[in-house]
């Protein structure tokens, strides 16, 4: 399938005709984090049955959409490194907007650059640096997805961060770390020299996703939060080489904590 086969309008029409739920929150679950979706109730749709919807091709991404009364859960996302355009990589954010969602929380597996991070930590994204080499909003302007030029000053909502910090304190008696996420295209993990560069420019986390959806979400006026699971120390910060199996496993190990936080958050009155 190619990018021109994908259509947010078609996917939204299909879903709106098949469910009476109109959720206000969307969650996008990253690598190895799909099982968190099981903590949420709702009608299930396989990505492959939804007309106009791209497919997940990466191990650890299930390709399942769950629509519940309050929450829309994407179990699996689309990456530029799979050959998708940045526009397609942002599909979950565009679709959430089209389905009437007002708040989106993006999760991902990330390498930890900040020296205080350990594998397994949940880190709230405070801001991002787009080093992916593209942007989902490039191209002819469609006003139904927001203004031509849009602000990114407080892209990751401070009030959502406060809400999530309060929940973390209640659940575990401590606040989460907050950091800046650098998005690169991948699919390689970084070189140690690249990690030193990223640290110098102010990045605390590194990954290959999230930025396209975050840009689309903000363009569409969605309130945005981001949460990284630190699955490994970034390249050169430990003696070990990196591999996807370990990243996926570390993501899986963090799923119980992530599900606790996200179900508590989804149950919080808006
Ligand atoms: N680099 C890039 N993406 C990642 C990493 C990393 O170290 N870990 C998980 N996703």
Image (cartoon, rainbow, N blue to C red):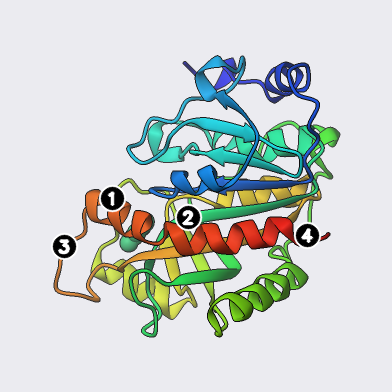
Q: Residue at x 61, y 18 (%)?
A: 52
The tag earlier along the polypeptide, 3 or 1, is 1
**Circle 2 is placed at which residue position?**
108
The crowd level at tag 2 (other Cα within 10 Å; few <14, some 14-19, many 20+) is many
Marking on residue 151: 4
- List x then y, in percent, for residue 174: 55, 84
Judge from the rendering whether residue 43 lies leftward or rightward of residue 23; answer left or right: left
Name which of mark 1 and mark 2 comes first in the sequence: 2
Residue for badge 1 = 188
Q: CA distance from mark 4 to mark 1?
A: 30 Å
Alpha carbon distance from label 2 to label 3:
20 Å
**Measured from the top left, where is residue 211 in percent x and y?**
56, 53
Foreground label between 2 and 3:
2
Q: Is residue 171 above or below residue 215?
A: below
Q: Reading the chain from its start, which is encountered first: label 2 or label 4?
A: 2
Circles 1 and 2 in contact, beta carbons < 8 Å: no
Q: How many discs mark residues in the rendered view?
A: 4
Q: Secondary structure at mark 1?
A: loop
Of residues 171 and 155, the one drawn nearer to the viewer in this rendering: 171
């Amino acid at each position: 399938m190619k990018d021109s086969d994908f259509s947010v309008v078609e996917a939204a029409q299909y879903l709106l005709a098949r469910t009476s739920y109109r959720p206000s929150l969307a969650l996008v679950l990253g690598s190895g984090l799909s099982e968190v979706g099981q903590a949420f109730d709702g009608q299930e749709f396989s990505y492959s049955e939804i007309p106009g919807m791209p497919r997940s091709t990466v191990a650890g991404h299930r390709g399942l959409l769950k629509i519940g009364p309050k929450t829309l859960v994407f179990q699996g996302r689309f990456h530029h490194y799979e050959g998708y355009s940045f526009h397609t990589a942002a599909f979950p954010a565009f679709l959430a907007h089209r389905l009437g969602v007002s708040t989106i929380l993006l999760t991902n597996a990330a390498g930890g650059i900040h020296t205080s991070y350990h594998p397994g930590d949940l880190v709230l994204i405070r801001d991002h640096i787009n080093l992916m080499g593209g942007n989902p909003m490039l191209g002819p302007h469609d006003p139904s997805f927001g203004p031509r030029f849009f602000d990114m000053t407080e892209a990751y909502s401070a009030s959502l961060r406060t809400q999530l910090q309060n929940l973390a304190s209640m659940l575990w008696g401590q606040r989460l770390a907050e950091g800046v996420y650098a998005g690169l295209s991948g699919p390689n993990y970084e070189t140690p020299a690249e990690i030193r560069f990223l640290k110098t420019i102010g990045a605390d986390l590194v990954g290959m996703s999230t930025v396209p959806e975050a840009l689309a979400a903000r363009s569409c006026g969605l309130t945005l939060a981001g949460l990284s699971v630190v699955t490994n120390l970034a390249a050169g910060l430990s003696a070990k080489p990196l591999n996807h199996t370990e990243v996926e496993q570390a993501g899986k190990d963090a799923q119980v904590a992530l599900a606790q936080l996200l179900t508590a958050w989804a149950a919080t009155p808006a």
